[in-house]
Image (cartoon, grey):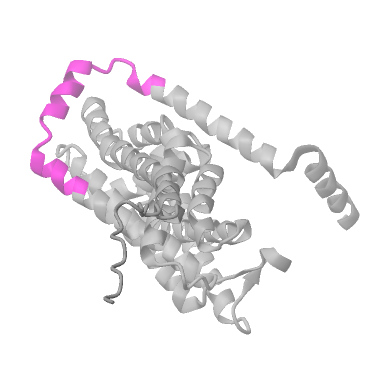
Amino acid sequence: MQQVLSTLGRVFRERIGWKRVGILASLIIVTIAILHLFRTLKGVDTAIVLTALAEKSQGQIALAALCVLCAFFTLTFYDLFALRTIGKMHVPYRIAALSSFTSYTIGHNIGATVFTGGAIRFRIYSDWGLNAIDVAKICFISGLTFWLGNTFVLGIGMIWHPAAAASIDLLPESINRLIGVGLLAGIAIYLSWIATGKGRRQLGKDGWKVHLPSAPLTVLQIVIGVIDLGFCALAMYLLAPSSPDLDFVTLSVVFILATLLGFASHAPGSLGVFDAAMLVGLPMLGKEQLLASLLVFRILYFLIPFATSITIMGVRELWLSVIQPWQQSRKLQPAPAVAQSSQQQQPPKQAAE
């Protein structure tokens, strides 16, 4: 039996591979989401959507924008935590914040976050002496922060309100509650595994070895992810239609599932996937009103940060590639010699006889 499993595993790695499975899973998610989106948007009245947009108060949008700002501030600690975990103490917070913000916003909006976000991180951190392996470790630990935070909140949400996920995963409430228990149990097992090891646990080997955070630091890691996710969900909650009444836990569970599906699809900005999941998961809300809320959320959470990141990186590249070399070349140029004309020099006075 062991030989058969070993043969099947070898055939899977050689003929199929996890990369192709991931691509296939992404295509399936995107296809299903688009079909759901088209089916859900049938009969939507554009005029009602525009009216719902106009009814959003400035205070409502301002509070949601503040939550988004707090979420991105929390996001800056993803890279800082990862840098300190791998021992790169010399990289200051401002560089970690720049890398975390730009790599997430640009990578998530363009798609294929692992590659685009990693390329941006390498462009920034290479100026501070970090190599490709260091950047890969940062990406791994930052991703671990994201998934631990989402898993923890999703587990609590599915235990507390299992019906909220039923409209998306189409599973009975009892099964959803069991999934929630399983998610929290998985985190508890992971924490126990880290805490019971001799020294810090590690994954990988040779140069790719990653030392995982200790149990107390992993709890901090989870807290960072939870706060980030909480601010994002709160922004969406503030923008959601006020009628009918919608509790925060229900929206949070649907929001997390929609976010995770969007990440799994690798679609640019989770476009179509996130929106379809929100529309399917919140059928009690009017489609037009929810579409208006999603549009405002996209502007606040996707478009404005994306434009800001592009501007920051563009100015940075202009400074590093054009302005800074030009200033250095000017400093290296020798000072012009002062021509001393013999005509301007007074002849030496002859000594008095």
Q: Is residue 53 magenta?
A: yes
Is residue 160 among the parts visible in the rendering? Answer: no
Q: Is residue 121 above or below residue 48?
A: below
Q: Residue at the far bottom: name it.
A: 198
What residue range appears in magenta? 38-65
Q: Which of 3 and 85 lies nearest the eye of the viewer? A: 85
Q: Residue at x 31, y 61 (%)?
A: 347
115 displayed left or right of 236: right
Q: Position of residue 149 (x, y in %)?
A: 42, 60
Residue 256, given in percent of the width and then of the height, sits at 39, 48
130 shown above or below 67: below
- Magenta part mainly helix, strand or loop? helix
- Residue positioned 39% across, 45% down in the render: 323
Answer whether residue 92 is magenta in the image. Answer: no
Q: Residue furthest right?
A: 3
Q: Position of residue 179 (x, y in %)?
A: 49, 55
For this view, does 135 lie left or right of residue 43? right
Above or below, 315 relative to 154: above
* Camera-side residue of 328 and 343: 343
Looking at the image, which residue is at 48% across and 59% down?
A: 142
In the depicted structure, whether residue 206 falls above or below residue 63 = below
Task: Give 264 or 302, whichever is nearer the viewer.
Answer: 302
Q: Is residue 340 left or right of residue 121?
A: left
Residue 1, image x, y percentages:
88, 55
Q: Going 28% across and 77% down the picture, which residue do you hit?
A: 353
Q: Would residue 139 be seen by someone viewing this image from the given angle?
A: yes
State which quadrant residue 207 falls in. bottom right
